[in-house]
């Protein structure tokens, strides 16, 4: 989709959040900063809500909101962490530092630095269900030490994965799936801001198809508008029937077969975070697309299914979906390079 995404250009303010109870709870944190756990299923707007809160509370939100996706740490190598522009100033001259110590240092330095405006800053930890318990203990100590100058906001779809000492230090903000009517309201506001014509049936169709995933609804409306210059029932039906994730799944498989593990991992991250896949669901999609749309040999597809069986239990246990699926593709890609024909340019 060409052009900026509507989810970015029309990021909601606090008053625009579709769930009234969330607006009420977050409004309390504007004048009285507190640690928060924003919890709910994928796509309901957890990160967008935290950004809206930061814009409301900080004069310089661009600098006083520090966003750290847990995948930025646990799914990356030491070199990738050390060269990330956000973390590089904290880690200069510390190439021998263990990954655990690198993560702890980034957390401490992010919390310790003085706010650019006002009395405090906000550190957002996104997708916190993937934080191991030993790192959660380190996080608890950082939260205790810097509670006067730093507000911690943790977003998660599985609050039970957080240790009790962290949950007890945070005010819970449950975010439910928005209703169809609430989603329609958001879509109408965005279409009007974009000067895109729409009808009620078109917005209702897009909202219903998104099944409570607000991000998906907005992007589906944008895709319909790009293709038809309006959002109508017929246009949305034609567009959404063409939209799917098969191409993204296929690109992850192709990247793994070509030895591009970084590209495969990036696509997996998009599918899990942006598209809202659960680990087991994405595992099934990888096998289905490999079988039906990939040019991989029957032996390679069979090997992928065998590897999938090995990681299925780990995914059911609710562990790190990205890590297990990345290992799956890495193992599959490595097997391909030894059992199938060489790739182009290889001897």
Image (cartoon, rainbow, N blue to C red):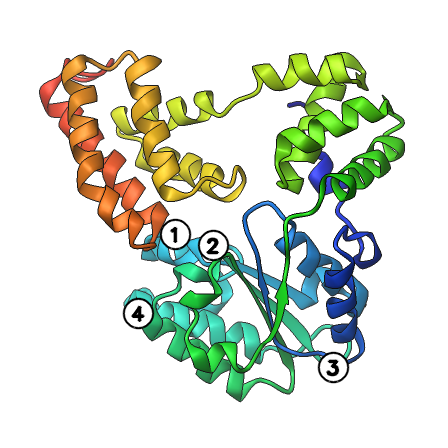
Mark 4 or mark 3, which has the lower sequence index? 4
Residue named by callout 4: 97
Looking at this view, is 192 or 326 the one in front?
A: 192
Residue named by callout 1: 80
Mark 3 or mark 1, which has the lower sequence index? 1
Mark 3 or mark 2, which has the lower sequence index? 2
Callout 3: SS: loop
Residue beneath the point at 41% across and 75% down: 163
The N terminus - image quarter:
top right
Q: Is residue 201 visible?
A: yes
In the rendered view, tell whether residue 347 sits above or below residue 261.
above
Residue named by callout 3: 119
Q: Distance between the residues labelled 2 and 4?
A: 15 Å
Callout 1: SS: helix
Looking at this view, is 239 or 204 the one in front?
A: 204
Check if mark 1's residue and mark 2's residue have beta carbons within 8 Å: yes
């Amino acid at each position: 989709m060409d052009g900026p995404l509507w989810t970015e250009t029309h990021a909601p303010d606090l008053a625009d959040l579709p769930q009234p109870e969330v607006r009420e709870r977050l409004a309390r944190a504007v004048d009285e900063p507190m640690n928060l756990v924003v919890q709910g299923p994928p796509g309901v707007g957890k990160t967008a809500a935290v950004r809206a809160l930061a814009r409301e509370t900080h004069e310089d939100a661009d600098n006083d909101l520090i966003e750290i996706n847990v995948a930025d740490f646990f799914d990356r190598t030491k070199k990738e962490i050390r060269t990330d522009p956000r973390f590089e100033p904290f880690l200069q001259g510390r190439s021998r530092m263990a990954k655990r110590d690198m993560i702890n240092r980034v957390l401490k330095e992010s919390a310790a630095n003085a706010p650019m405006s006002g009395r405090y800053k906000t550190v957002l930890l996104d997708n916190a269900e993937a934080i191991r318990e030993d790192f959660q203990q380190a996080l608890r100590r950082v939260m205790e030490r810097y509670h006067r100058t730093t507000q911690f906001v943790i977003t998660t779809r599985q609050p039970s994965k957080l240790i009790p000492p962290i949950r007890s230090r945070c005010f819970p903000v449950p975010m439910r799936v928005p209703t169809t009517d609430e989603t329609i309201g958001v879509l109408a506001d965005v279409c009007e801001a974009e000067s895109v014509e729409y009808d009620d049936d078109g917005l209702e169709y897009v909202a219903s198809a998104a099944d409570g995933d607000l991000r998906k609804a907005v992007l589906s409306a944008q895709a319909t508008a790009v293709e038809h210059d309006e959002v109508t029932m017929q246009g949305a039906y034609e567009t959404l029937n063409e939209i799917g994730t098969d191409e993204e799944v296929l690109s992850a498989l192709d990247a793994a077969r070509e030895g591009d593990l970084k590209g495969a991992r990036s696509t997996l991250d998009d599918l899990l975070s942006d598209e809202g896949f659960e680990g087991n669901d994405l595992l099934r999609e990888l096998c289905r697309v490999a079988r039906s749309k990939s040019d991989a040999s029957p032996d390679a597809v069979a090997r992928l299914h065998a590897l999938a069986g090995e990681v299925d239990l780990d995914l059911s246990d609710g562990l790190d979906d990205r890590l297990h699926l990345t290992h799956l593709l890495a193992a599959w890609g490595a097997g391909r390079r030894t059992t199938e024909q060489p790739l182009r340019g290889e001897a």
